[in-house]
Image: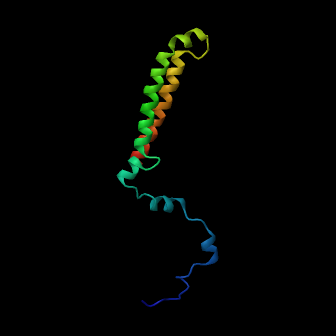
């Protein structure tokens, strides 16, 4: 192959010192297979599983500790604790779905 030494082929020092545009970097980074989206850390399945586990185990523990929570007189009762558990688990499941789609 013949090599050309034209000025258009050579990058200047100024051009090399400039960062790449974010849109071009993100366009190059779109290669992600389905199995990578599911299993690679942090994969979508991991977040969805963690959200489901958090919800199930936390609600089970809240049910087991119900009497202690009600007797404690804490300003955080069962409703606010259940809302916190639901919010955390919904966030984790949402992160998993976002990772799977994007």
Q: Of residues 15 and 71, which is closer to you in this image? A: 71
Q: Position of residue 5 (x, y in %)?
A: 53, 88
Q: Is residue 27 rendered to the left or right of residue 11? A: left
Q: Of residues 13 and 57, which is closer to you in this image? A: 57
Residue appearing at x 57%, y 78% in the figure: 11
Among all residues in the image, which is located at the extreme top? Answer: 71
Give above or below for 33 relative to 62. Answer: below
- Describe the colour scheme in one phrase: rainbow
Q: Position of residue 75 (x, y in %)?
A: 61, 15
Q: Position of residue 32 (x, y in %)?
A: 40, 56
Q: What is the number of callouts on the image?
A: 0
Give above or below for 22 relative to 8. Answer: above
Residue appearing at x 63%, y 76% in the figure: 13
- Image quarter (top left, top right, bottom left or bottom right) of the N terminus: bottom left
Among all residues in the image, which is located at the extreme bottom? Answer: 2
Give above or below for 11 relative to 99. Answer: below
Among all residues in the image, which is located at the extreme left? Answer: 34
Give above or below for 83 relative to 73. Answer: below
Q: Is residue 37 rendered to the left or right of residue 68? A: left
Rendering quarter of residue 77 = top right
Q: Of residues 88 and 60, which is closer to you in this image? A: 60
Q: Of residues 28 and 96, which is closer to you in this image? A: 96
Residue appearing at x 47%, y 47% in the figure: 42
Residue appearing at x 46%, y 48% in the figure: 41
């Amino acid at each position: 192959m013949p090599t050309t030494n034209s000025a258009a082929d050579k990058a200047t020092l100024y051009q090399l010192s400039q960062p790449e545009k974010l849109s071009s970097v993100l366009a190059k980074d779109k290669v992600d297979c389905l199995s990578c989206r599911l299993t690679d850390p942090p994969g979508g399945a991991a977040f969805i599983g963690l959200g489901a586990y958090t919800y199930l185990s936390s609600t089970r523990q809240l049910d087991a500790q119900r009497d202690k929570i009600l007797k404690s007189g804490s300003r955080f009762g069962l409703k606010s604790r259940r809302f916190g558990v639901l919010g955390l688990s919904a966030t984790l499941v949402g992160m998993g779905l976002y990772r799977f789609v994007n």
